[in-house]
Image (tube, helix red, strand yellow):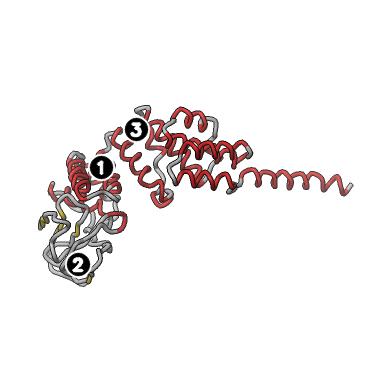
Amino acid sequence: MRFKLLAPALAILLISACATVSTAPTNTPANAAAEQLISEGKFREAALAYESDAAMSKGYPHDAALIRAANAWKLAGDENKARNLIAPIPRKKLSGEVAFLHDLLNAEFLLADKRGGEAIAFLNQRRDSVPGNERSRWHTDRYRAFDAAGLKFDVAGEQIWLMDGMKPKERAAAGRNIERLLGLVPAAELAQKSAGLSASEPFYAYVARELKKRGMPLPMPVVAARRASLPSGASARSFTTTGFSVLSVSGEACWAMAPSGPASSSAPSASLEAPLALEAGAGGFGSALVSALSFMGCAVRVSS
């Protein structure tokens, strides 16, 4: 009798244990080898290694390996194979990096099908949740999706992240593109979306300049400045700024802005001692109020 009572409970425990094993991702030697091949740019070989890993797995590890294989085939240029691998895998069972790759691939398939507006729903992750090695790709996809949907403000917001790693002339062109895009945003949309930005992010400085150009109020003062990354031999010191409304390096993502009016202890501040050559700061964006007004030969303009 006691055995009969215990048997159902034991069965439930065994089923639960099996479910836990089948859904937990594992790091197999084949998986590690495939990741190494990806890092070496050997995408086809990586795809085959992931497929081999999937063939020896079940449940979650099987699906995870297939999604990674699909991603590798996509990187190798075989989009049809990537689509076929990922199609049968339900998104709701996925999590973490595997779920992100599933979303990213589906977004890229929609972009390839000229359905960029629909891809936005697959690219709405928080930036800090995106794997570091995929952020540039993610921002590029978001740029294309927003562009397809005609969302100029959002395209400009992605452009600033894509400036990371660009050469000076490319950054200059990207900066001009941000200004051009913001100039096309309707006033009501500009006011609404600018209110949702953080005052300390570089994109807000561009937005603030556009608002100021149109005679529109700023939702908040711009915080100058993030800590800049300095080249060898340059040093930084803090002091209270006064007299500047906006400082920008023409075509670059270097900016600083302080509230107009008399200086105060709470005013945003940052400067660099001469001789100055300011490198791009965190995320590829330099932001500082400079004492020696030069940045790799760029012209500096100040508006008050």
Quarter of the C terminus within the rendering: bottom left
Q: Which of 128 and 195 is in front in this view?
A: 128
Disc 1 versus disc 2: distance between alpha carbons?
30 Å
Amino acid type at circle 1 is: Phe
Residue located beneath label 2 in the image: 271
Residue 212: percent from the left, percent from the top? 14, 51
Disc 2 versus disc 3: distance between alpha carbons?
42 Å
Amino acid type at circle 2 is: Ser
Residue located beneath label 3 in the image: 117
Query: Mark 1 packing: few (<14 Cα in 10 Å), some, or many (20+)?
Result: many
Residue located beneath label 1 in the image: 153
Element on which disc 2 rests: strand
Element on which disc 3 rests: helix
Residue 136: percent from the left, percent from the top? 35, 46
| Dot placed on the residue nearer the N-terminal end, 3 or 1 | 3
For the point 27% across and 41% down, the residue is 155
| Dot placed on the residue nearer the N-terminal end, 2 or 3 | 3
